[in-house]
Amino acid sequence: MKKNVLVTIILFLSAAGGASAQQEFNMRITEGMPAVAFALPPFVAAPAAKDAAAEIHSVLEADIRYTRIFELLPKSYYGYIRPLTDPNSPEFKDWESIQANVLLTGRVEAEPEGGIIFSWVLYDVKSKRTIIAPRRFQYKDKNLRYLAHATADEIMKAYGEKPIFTSKIAFVSNRDRNEEIYLMDYDGANQTRLIYNQVNDSNPAWDPGGKRLAYSSWQNLVVGVYILDVFEKARARTPVSLKGQNYTPAWSPDGKKLAFSSSMNGNHEIYVADIESNPTRVGRIKQLTFNPAVDIAPSWSPNGREIVFTSDRSGTTQIYIMDAEGGNVRRISFGANHHDAPAWSPNGDKIVYVARVDNAFDLYLYNIRSGQISKLTEIYGRNESPSWSPDGRHILFTSNVSGRNQIHAIDVDGRNFRKLTSMGENKLADWSN
């Protein structure tokens, strides 16, 4: 999902300077390769733009560091070479001397009416060619953090990676009394309330386009599933009958169907609703599971052919996979322990879920191909409600490790644990595309 910000992006190839006149070429990252040495010197800026340049640079540094694809060169290295004065004509020998593989140079200008212009280039130092030809970002609303995130997304796309930095995270918070749905940036910044229902809302789920949000809401003593067009501020609509209690909505990869759990026929089963473009209508609703047990928490495979879900049909709560039409049900978790909240990875190779082992709730990864299970979290407390980042490299989850439920993120290899929220209690995060 991309935030709607007034931005003009002008792409150009400079006719001056040998390197910047080169055409762009694509880079690809291979799993297991060492991190790419990334040089990010201070941006050239006039006095009126110094503060803006420093903020853009700081946010972009954090984004680049978070990728773990790149390794930022220490700032002290820049003291050994000549200061950069022209972003379009770097002295590549200088940057080779400090062992930089990639160089991003930039200039920040302040417009008289208050806007900001950020021009930048990404170079491959050894070949002296541009990886990304000169960009010129013009922002009218001074949203400097977004400008930095948009730059990081461009870099990730050039390296064949799914961009995540302008994505949004939806989550549930009680900071304003009721449990309502909020939004924040991928790094926890810009936390804002989205829905003002004065009732409890839960289970936010982004559609594949990052524009609509499905969620559960307690209204008139009934829990219904609603859809909100997030950035158009259109009114919420009900995609299912309000009969029964309806929870855990999950979008199909094409955005045309919504799976959810409902007790509309007495027992909690998995259903799928056809989602039509008409904002006041919903298509056919099909029941997928028929079992006296509780079936809940569906999550689609990225190819849309299968659904993973939670069921206690075996006598304990376990994880199952079925075909998207409801057939071929098979169990993938075993043992007497509690298993819940499965989420299929964007790459389709893993399923993350929660398991209670020795009275500790932790996240586990199930490998689709091998069937092997590995423990992801080793954190004291209750760790629940996992959600994948769009690139499949990071996982959001709820943990009470600090004493209250808060949203945390962790890399898929178990490193880079970080806390994103602190005000009130926060839970049930979902990461947009």
Image (tube, helix red, strand yellow):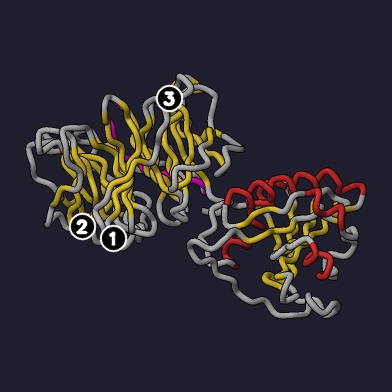
The circle drawn on residue 400 is 3
Instruction: Describe residue 147's horizontal placement relative to residue 336 as left or right.
Output: right
Count residues near mark 2 (Cα–Cα under 10 Å), then give few for <14, some for 14-19, many for 20+: some
Separation of marks 3 and 2 at Cα, in angstroms: 34 Å
Q: Secondary structure at mark 3?
A: loop
Say whether residue 352 is magenta: no
The circle drawn on residue 414 is none
Q: Is residue 137 above or below residue 234?
A: below
Which residue in the protein does label 1 denote? 304
Please, what is the three-letter code of the amino acid marked with disc 3?
Asn
Separation of marks 3 and 1 at Cα, in angstroms: 33 Å
Measuring from the top left, give residue 157's x and y in whole percent.
57, 65
Measuring from the top left, give residue 42's x and y in whole percent.
81, 52
| Magenta extent | 220-231
Residue displayed at 44% across by 47% down: 413
Please, what is the three-letter code of the amino acid marked with disc 1?
Gly
| CB under 8 Å between discs 2 and 1 | yes
Q: Main secondary structure of the magenta part?
A: strand
The residue lying toward the viewer, choosing from 223 and 27, is: 27
Badge nearest the viewer, 3 or 2: 3
Q: Earlier in the sequence, mark 3 or mark 2?
A: 2
Quadrant assignment, res 256: bottom left
Badge nearest the viewer, 3 or 1: 3
The residue lying toward the viewer, choosing from 327 and 117, is: 327
Residue displayed at 90% across by 61% down: 85
| CB under 8 Å between discs 3 and 1 | no
Which residue in the protein does label 2 denote? 324
Res. 275 visible in picture = yes
